[in-house]
Structures are given as C-alpha cells and as structure tokens.
Amino acid sequence: MASLPLPLTSATPSSQSRPIFARPSYFLTHAKRSNRLRVSCTDGRNKKEASRNVETPLGKVDRRNMLLGLGGGLYGAANLISTPGASADPVKPPQLDTCGNSTYSTNLQQTIEVACCPPTSQNPAIDYQLPPVTQMKIRPAAQNLSPEYIYKYNKAIECMKKLQEENPDDPRGFMQQANIHCAYCNGAYTYPQPGQDPFTLQTHFSWLFFPFHRWYLYFYERILGKLIGDPTFALPFWNWDNPKGMKIPKFFLDHNSPLYDCKRNQKHLKSVVDLGFTGSTDPLQVVSNNLTVMYNEMIGANTDVYDFMGQPYCQGTQSSYAAAGAVERGSHTAVHVFVGDPREAANEDLGNFYSAARDPLFFCHHANVDRMWTLWQYDLSSEQIPDKTIHSDNFNNAEFLFYDENAQLVRVKVGDCVNNQLMGYDFEEVDLPWVDYRPPPQTTKAKVTRATKTAENTETVFPLKLDQIVRIIVPKTKKGKADESLVIENITIDASKFLKFDVFVNDEDDDLTELDKAAYAGTFAQVPHKGHKTVTTWIKLRLTDLYKRMDVEDDDTVLVTLVPRHQGEGVTIGGVKIIENPPPPKSSG
C-alpha cells in the first residue's frame, strides 16, 4: 500500500501535526540528478552552505514560523501525562573531563576496558540553536540510491576516515564519531551522588533512546556534508521494514568501499534480516514474521506514549535501565545482533554497544529507527494514544553534548528534536506493508486446553530462570472485552549478553518459528553492552488487539508462553500478571 500522507500543518503546532512543512512532494526526492561527481574533502570553514537563501520547491521559510514552531508543543509546562519519577531532575549533560573508560565482556566472559571518551574542549559548550530551514534534506531509502548518491556517500565517509588519520583528536573524525555511542551507551559517563553509588548515564532502555540517536545522526550527517562541501547531504535509511529493503544494502558489501566493515556476520550478508530472530530458514516466513513484528511494535502492542518511546528516566535513576520501548527492544535490537560478527570476541562491530558505530551501517540502520519515530508520531493514528507528545519537563529538558560540524562543543535539549522537520530533514516516502499486517484470528482452542494441563501457576513458578520454553496460566482482570495488558516484571538480566524472549498468549501452534499468528504478543531483547552488570527492567504488552483475534473473552485465565531465543541462562523473571489499562488521556491538541 502507499505510505500514509502527513496532514497539512498550520502555524500553530499540536501533538499530531508538524509546525512548518507538509510531507515533501514526490519530485523532491526524485529531482533531476546533478552531473557533478567531483566531490572533494573539505572542512567547509570558508564556504557558505549552498542551501542558504535558496528558493526551493517547499517555498521560503518564514523565521516567524520557526519561532512559532519552537514555542508550541516542545516545552509545554503542564505535565498532561502522569509520569513516574516526576520529582526527579532531567538528565544533565556529561562532564567530558570526568569521562572514564567503558567496559565490555567477551564471549569468554573476560571484561575488557576500552577508552572511548571524546576530546575535551578548550572552550565551554554553547547552547545549540537549530538553524533556519531553507531547504529540506530528504533521507532516501537505501535500496533506491542512484550511483551518484552512492559515490557521494562513499566520499563523505572516506573524508571522515581521512580526517581521523590526519588528526586523531578531531572530534569529527571517524573513530571519534564512533566513540560517541560507546561513551554514552557503555558506562563512560558517571555522576557522583553523595551517600549513593554514582549515577551512570545510559541513553538506551528509556525515553532517551529516540532523542539521543536523533541528535547523534543529526550532527553526524552535518559533519559528512561539511567534509564534502554539500550541506544538502542526507543519510540514507536501511528500509528493513519493507520486503524490498530487508537485506543489507549492496553498496555496504563492496570490499573496496569505505562503507565496508569486515566485522559482520558472514552468513547474513545476503540474507533477509530476521527481525523476529526466530531462526527460520524459510525466507518467505522470515518476511512474514518481519511484517508481523513491525505491526506489533508500531500499532498493536502500545497502550500509551511510553510503551513506544520507553519509560521515564531521570538524573539519579538507580538502575541504568528504566524500560525500553517496543521498537528499541524489538526490530532495533534484532538488526544489531543479526549483523554483528559471531567470530569476534564480543560480536563486534554492530553486535555490541561499545563498537556498534564503528560500522557505517549503524547510521543507515538508525536512520530507519529514527524514521519509525516519525512515522509513529505523524502517520499512524491511534484511538488509544491520541496525544503522542511527552509533556514532561524531565523529558524535554534532558541534555546531551555533541561536537557540531565546525568542531564546536554544543549542548542540546531533547525538546528541540521532537520534530524532525524543524531540524531540516525528512524521509523519502516508501510503502508501509506492515500497516495492514494484522495477524489472522485463531480458530481453535484444542491444543491450548491440552497445554494448560502441564502449565505452571503464577503463585508457584516465580522467580524463574528462562533457559527453556515456559508456559504459565495467568488470571485475567475480568471476563468480557476488557482493555488489558500483560506485564512481565522484575526481568533481571546479564547486560553483557544478547538476550531475547518472545511472548505468546493461548498459542495453539507448536511451530515457534512463526510469528504471523494471533497468539504473538511481543518481545524483549537487548544488545550486549557494559560488561558483567546485572540490571532489572520490565515490559508491558497490550492484549486488547490480541483478544480481538482470539476467542478468550469469556475465559478467566490465559496461557502465556515465554520462548527464549538466546542460548543458555541470563534472564530471570520475577512475575507475570495482567492489568487493566486506564482510559486513554485526552489529546492536548
């Protein structure tokens, strides 16, 4: 089916519209290609951006509209959605001069320290102001790139690697940029807390996940454009949610390209990416599973904005985890681990947080993750979540530090990145086949009835080590068409391992490589990161859509099946329960 169009926007923003631009016209992404292939490396310090004061198909941008856009939905003082930990403080930007080493664990459980702190700046950080948007950059789908575009992309990465060789301390160099992910995501930044253990900053597993990576890609993209003297350069996105893009883009496999990375799973270089990580060897089944995963993450499993974005995470949070949103713990994690090289000691590069950004494919992957946030915000309507804006000051005022394209240290706020068009970029429109990929109804309960005879009871089974398939009888809150969610709580995990389990409800099928069925409820997964650290988290999976596909309205209990996709131990679960969902909040728009 065709992509769902964005609504036209007005000067006054709301939670469901963008303040300035409507969805770009098709011809913007398929404009006549330039014949200029002489792209050279430059830091661009003495060149004006080509997009300044340029008349574009989008028209001129009125700065008053920019001010209106920034003043509306980004920093709402009223916390319209109740958030846990609302009395805590927003996450503060790290102190570069106190950055420490990160650690990671090898497959032999050896803990290794790695230095990935950025260079300190002689000048203090300045508050970053988004520049006026005079020409919208369009991030294209990787499978649609022209030879000219691929050439330019290669040249940009080549320039970034050359800069690293010439000046290893330049924060815009290739390894310095890769180390940003290591530092923010692998325990390098800590804050002392009187009478408590230090607070360790982690930008995964919470509502910081999407904003941090959006800012990360934003500056990375601008640095690449600066190095080749083309401020219109936009990163492509790996379109792994579409069957046409479910393999690693071919131009990443050229051994002579700066985009090539030898540390990738050699068995997966030309395979369909397995977003469900079921191990199915049938490509058609994998594609069907993938579309089911995307439907579940983007539409079926969310009860509120936090189920998608991740749970609140504030300064001083005792655990480095809050709880990850549906995309982060699902398709995002699956792609990381699918590409990471099992021949390496810690599944480098993409398969471990400390090394993930050393593979240029990381940024193409995360461009699609960022696209998921945009699609969810603006393209997918939801009666359950009419307001997809997080109004908490603890979210909007959280801050990070980055170096911009001029090597200037800048301080950014989460609230300034919630609208991608205000940041000057959008995405090429492609089909969204998963939008209509709702699993078919289940037709029989025979096998479920037999399975309940050997299932465990919630009063006796917990805590349990999830190293094999477990079936549990869980009481519902009420009979009838209740709006309910399944909560899996006190999930204690070894952060140094790849861990994943899937959740099925009243599963009638013994073939657990198939996710495209009514019983599939959702997943939990994590990418390996800081070594030998045990953390505790939880997940919530909405059951309402699943109930509609299955004949369980009159039942007092349901059968929950937990299927580990990892090998061995690493996950302990403290409890499983069903809760009734509160009514959706009213939209503030």
Image (cartoon, rainbow, N blue to C red):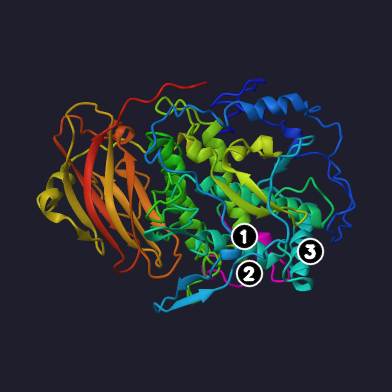
Observer-side mark, 1 or 3, equals 3
Callout 3 secondary element: helix
The quarter holding residue 94 reads: bottom right
* Residue located at (27% from left, 49% from top): 489
Q: CA distance from mark 2 to mark 3?
A: 16 Å
Which residues make up the magenta segment?
247-269
How many marks the image carries: the answer is 3
Which labelled disc corresponds to residue 261? Answer: 2
- Rendered location of residue 244, percent (x, y): 59, 48
* Cβ atoms at labels 2 and 3 below 8 Å apart: no
Check whether the beta carbons of the residues at disc 2 and disc 1 lie within 8 A of each other.
yes
Pointer 2 or 1: first along the chain: 2
The residue located at (31%, 54%) in the rendering is 512
Marked residue nearer the N-terminal end (2 or 3)? 3
Mark 3: few/some/many CA within 10 Å (<14, 14-19, 20+): many
> Which residue in the protein does label 1 denote?
361
What residue sits right under mark 3 in the picture? 159
Q: Is residue 103 above or below residue 237?
A: below
Q: Amino acid at mark 3?
A: Cys
Relative to 107, is 492 on the left or the right? left
